[in-house]
Image (cartoon, grey):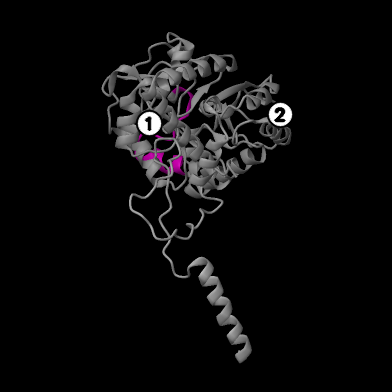
């Protein structure tokens, strides 16, 4: 370097350091308080002689930063609306756009529409454009066998879970990868699958909701975990979030909670084979699945409440015992017979009070009643409001992790 240039560089550095304070320490960046609301900026208790340089901003893709930005753009009603995934009847797809405009957290395509993947992609794109909330979950039931919502052009017919569980690992991985890609191409980003329920060998025909329809991957946790994990990972590779269901397990019940009141599992307990299947799948995947709750009652876990309304099941067993921190979604609280004796609005309130995150209702007409009930309880009960705050933050963090808050 020439001497003249060197002198100019020294002068320039001196000016810059005089303006910015070269070598000064930067203070730590504050983070959210974990209770579902952004933390307030704090003021140091000791005097400072000079302000430090500003902290390095979080990267644009930082999930917590995205959540904070999303929360800043939502009033109280809009935040609570994010806690609902609402059904769109297959014969009334226009209702999806209406619900999206009302700011729901997600839509669920109920029934079996005849649309092809290309037609569904156009439809779901319209829903996203109409959405008044941050991102939009678009969910389906795409398990395989008798539970496959999408069967039109562009969607492979999937074998039932019993057959999937018998596939060699490489073939099941290929199936899961194809499944994820086909859903993503249609604009679907949330699959209410896989079923992680363990159905004991020899009881399949008497297990109404799962075994009777071949929806289980196996009769032991050791059989279920590898298959369920392959599905979760295959979906995640295509940007589709999976849902493990139906915690703590429907593999031992007889009645189906969709059409039977007071379904009871007298045998399942905390930490048994069923719980091991969920724990093993959550441990084996690096993805961020949701967990769906059963609407049955488990006397050996919580005799006083159905699982979907049970703090013992959600907070103690799933959160505490399994360490799960992601979204907990209900099974259908709109049309299911298992919860028909509970007033519509109270279903949503009780689920969220127990620690749930996303209220799933297949019946769109129940959404306004549920939303109003949660808003009313939120305004009257500070403890419940704090629980709602935590649920909203969990819901939005899942959206950030799924790439829906960019």
Q: Quadrant of residue 253?
A: top left
Determine if residue 96 is in view. Answer: yes
The image shows residue 404 at horizontal and vertical percentages of: 58, 41
* Disc 2 packing (10 Å; few <14; some 14–19; many ≥20): some
Label 1, label 2: how many angstroms apart (C-alpha)?
33 Å
Give the dominant element type of the magenta stretch: helix, strand or loop: helix
> Image point 41% across, 57% down: which residue?
27
Residue 115: which numbered mark, if any?
Answer: 2
The image shows residue 135 at horizontal and vertical percentages of: 60, 36
Residue 198: which numbered mark, if any?
Answer: 1
Q: Looking at the picture, does residue 66 appear above or below residue 35?
A: below
Q: Quadrant of residue 240?
A: top right
Asked if the residue under mark 2 is in contact with the one under mark 1, i.e. CB atoms within 8 Å, the reply is no
* Disc 1 packing (10 Å; few <14; some 14–19; many ≥20): many
The image shows residue 275 at horizontal and vertical percentages of: 33, 33
Q: Nearer the viewer, residue 50 or 32?
A: 50
Please tell me whether mark 1 sits on a helix, a strand or a loop: loop
**How many labels sit on residues?**
2
On whether residue 259 falls in the magenta region, the answer is no
Q: Which residues are magenta?
A: 212-229
């Amino acid at each position: 370097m020439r001497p003249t240039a060197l002198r100019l560089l020294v002068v320039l550095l001196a000016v810059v350091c005089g303006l910015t304070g070269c070598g000064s320490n930067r203070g730590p960046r504050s983070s959210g308080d974990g209770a579902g609301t952004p933390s307030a900026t704090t003021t140091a208790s000791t005097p400072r002689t000079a302000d430090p340089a500003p902290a390095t901003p979080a990267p644009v893709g930082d999930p917590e930063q995205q959540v904070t930005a999303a929360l800043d753009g939502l009033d109280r009603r809009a935040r609570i609306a994010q806690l609902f995934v609402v059904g769109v009847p297959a014969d009334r797809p226009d209702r999806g756009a209406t619900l999206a405009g009302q700011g729901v957290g997600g839509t669920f395509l109920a029934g079996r529409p005849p649309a092809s993947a290309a037609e569904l992609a156009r439809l779901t794109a319209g829903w996203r454009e109409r959405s008044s909330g941050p991102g939009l979950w678009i969910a389906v039931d795409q398990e395989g066998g008798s539970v496959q919502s999408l069967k039109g052009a562009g969607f492979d017919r999937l074998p039932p879970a019993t057959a999937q569980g018998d596939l060699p690992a490489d073939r099941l991985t290929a199936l899961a990868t194809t499944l994820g890609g086909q859903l993503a191409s249609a604009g679907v980003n949330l699959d209410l699958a896989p079923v992680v329920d363990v159905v004991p060998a020899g009881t399949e025909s008497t297990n109404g909701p799962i075994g009777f329809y071949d929806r289980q991957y196996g009769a032991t946790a050791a059989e279920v975990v590898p298959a369920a994990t392959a599905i979760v990972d295959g979906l995640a590779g295509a940007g589709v979030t999976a849902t493990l269901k139906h915690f703590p397990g429907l593999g031992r019940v007889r009645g189906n909670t969709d059409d039977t009141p007071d379904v009871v599992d007298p045998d399942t307990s905390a930490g048994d084979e069923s719980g091991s299947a969920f724990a093993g799948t959550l441990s084996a995947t690096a993805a961020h699945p949701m967990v769906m709750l059963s609407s049955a009652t488990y006397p050996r876990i919580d005799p006083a409440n159905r699982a979907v309304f049970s703090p013992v099941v959600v907070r103690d067993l799933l959160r505490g015992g399994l360490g799960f921190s992601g979204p907990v979604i209900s099974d259908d609280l709109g049309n299911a017979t298992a919860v028909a004796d509970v007033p519509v609005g109270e279903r949503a309130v009780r689920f969220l009070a127990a620690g749930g995150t996303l209220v799933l209702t297949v019946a769109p007409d129940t959404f306004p009643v549920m939303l109003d009930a949660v808003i009313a309880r939120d305004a009257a009960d500070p403890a419940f409001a704090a629980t709602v705050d935590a649920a909203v933050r969990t819901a939005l963090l899942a959206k950030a992790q799924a790439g829906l808050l960019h």
